[in-house]
Amino acid sequence: MKKETPILIVEDEVLSAMSLQQDLKRSGYTNSSYVTTGEDALAQLQNDTAGLVIMDISLGGGMSGIETAEVIAADNKIPVILASGYSYADYKDRVEAIENVVFLKKPIRKMELLKILESI
């Protein structure tokens, strides 16, 4: 993935979102923004074009990260990295049913994230 590609972070914990945004910036990915709910992510994607979404599975608000990823996959075909502190086995069937989605275990390790970003 090109470093100038817009990245949308969807994380209900603002400090975590800001920290991830700073990690991305330090790694050369300078075009990122964040929202705190799945609904806000979908609204932003209607107005802006993101090239990638990094999203927590457990979001505050009405939609989970998985539900939001399903809508994104159906409408936009944008790659999504779903992150969770819970085991992948808890979400495996639902995550694997969504196109263009990668699972990342929290806490997000910068080097692991960068490898995924380079492979997209």
Image (cartoon, rainbow, N blue to C red):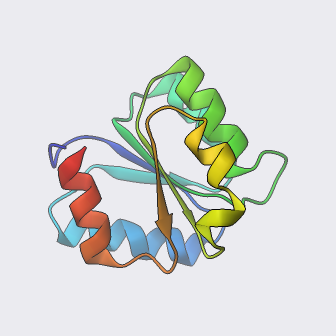
Query: Does residue 48 sit above or below 62 in this rendering?
Result: above
Q: Nearer the viewer, residue 69 or 9?
A: 69
Q: Position of residue 67 (x, y in %)?
A: 72, 40
Q: Position of residue 113 (x, y in %)?
A: 31, 66
Q: Position of residue 107 (x, y in %)?
A: 49, 81
Please state, as top left, top right, bottom left or bottom right, where the C terminus lies in the image. top left
Query: Does residue 8 sit above or below 69 in this rendering?
Result: below
The residue at the point 50 percent across, 72 percent down is 105
The residue at the point 36 percent across, 79 percent down is 109
Q: Nearer the viewer, residue 98 or 50?
A: 98
Query: Does residue 66 sit above or below 100 in this rendering?
Result: below
Mark count: 0
* Residue furthest right as drawn: 62
* Residue furthest top as drawn: 75
Q: Position of residue 79 (x, y in %)?
A: 40, 38
Query: Does residue 114 sit above or below 4 in this rendering?
Result: below
Please state, as top left, top right, bottom left or bottom right, where the N terminus lies in the image. top left
The answer to whether residue 28 is left or right of residue 117 is left
The answer to whether residue 27 is left or right of residue 106 is left
- Which quadrant of the view contains residue 98? top right
The residue at the point 44 percent across, 24 percent down is 77
Q: Nearer the viewer, residue 39 or 85?
A: 85
